[in-house]
Amino acid sequence: KKRATYHPIMRTLQLSPSRQSAASANNNNNSATKRQKRRSVVVVRLSARAENDDDGMMMSTLPLIDIQFEGFNSPDIPASPGIYAIYNDKKELQYVGLSRKISASIKMHCFELPAECGFAKVLPMEEATKVDLQDGWKRWVMAHVSESGGSLPPGNTPKNGLWADRKKRGPSKPSLRLTNGMTPDMSFDALKPKIQEAIDEHKIVAFIKGTREEPECGYSHRVVNALNSLLLDFETVNVLDDKYNPNLLYVMKEFSDWPTIPQVYANKEFLGGHDIIVKMFEKGELKDAVK
């Protein structure tokens, strides 16, 4: 006897309308169940991955880096995007930050708040987006809140005046170059007219260590901050740039007969070094002096 066979499609066609509806609903339910199972597996996998990611991002698992006495120049502090935490010399958390350049941010904190900066923890995030950095920052802050019984790090409190109120920064501007970079060694006599030319052509020139965005010493940092705070238009010359300003660190001291860097010139005259500029700024005299 020949057994009857039915093609799935023909089977559906042979059903009554009511049975077709029931069968269709049953199939939909089965599909929905399968999709839900697949979603559950994906969610479990994602959750496990997130837990692993969280383990790698936890502040508690990262080493403390000593940033005192110019320790902020440590190779363990990268110039990459990421999140970081600053601790005082008692290893108490003071601030959690995020940055496009961790090394520059930590250096800036050390210049501005040396008494609060003893140690740091860093988590580089090379390919991080803004959202990634914000998420990582929130995790670190909330981890501290949980561990401390509900307290924010002092520097992250809403009314904090030390960490949150950053100094005014002027517009980004490249440093002046005294040469074309083709003469690696220049004598005082060769470099002197180049220095004088920069002073004569610009109203305010600050000869500093580093750049205005990244000063290489606290003295240069404070002078740049003073000029920025007054919203002055000024130029900088990096005395440590031996390619374009060869030997300038030493020549500059002889040129001005002043033993230290930074040095500020205004209206073609020597105005002063760090102590003089900062004192004039604090007394409210600096703006008038550079008019």
Image (cartoon, rainbow, N blue to C red):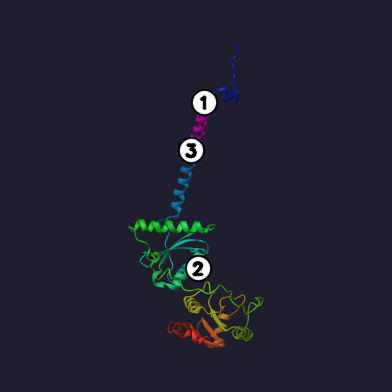
Q: Residue furthest left?
A: 149
Residue under circle 1?
A: 18
N-term mark: 3 or 1? 1
Callout in the foreground (2, 3)? 3
Label ID, residue 75: none
Residues marked 3 and 1 touching at CB (< 8 Å): no
For image coordinates 36% across by 58% down, the residue present is 145
Q: Bounds of the magenta span?
A: 21-36
Q: Position of residue 247 (x, y in %)?
A: 59, 80
Q: List the residue tagged with mark 2.
A: 104
Query: Does the magenta-highlighted stretch encompass residue 28?
Result: yes
**For residue 201, side relative to residue 62 (left or right):** right
Residue depicted at x 38% and y 58%: 144
Residue 229, image x, y percentages: 48, 77
Mark 3–mark 1 distance (CA, rounded to whole Å): 27 Å
Mark 3 vs mark 1, foreground winner is 1
Q: Which label is found at residue 36?
A: 3
Q: Quadrant of residue 267?
A: bottom right
Q: Amino acid at mark 3?
A: Gln
Judged from this view, the residue extending furthest toward the top is 1
Residue at the extreme front of the image, as rendered? 17
User: What is the three-letter code of the residue carrying label 2?
Assistant: Ala
Q: Earlier in the sequence, mark 2 or mark 3?
A: 3
First reached walking from the N terminus: tag 2 or tag 1: 1
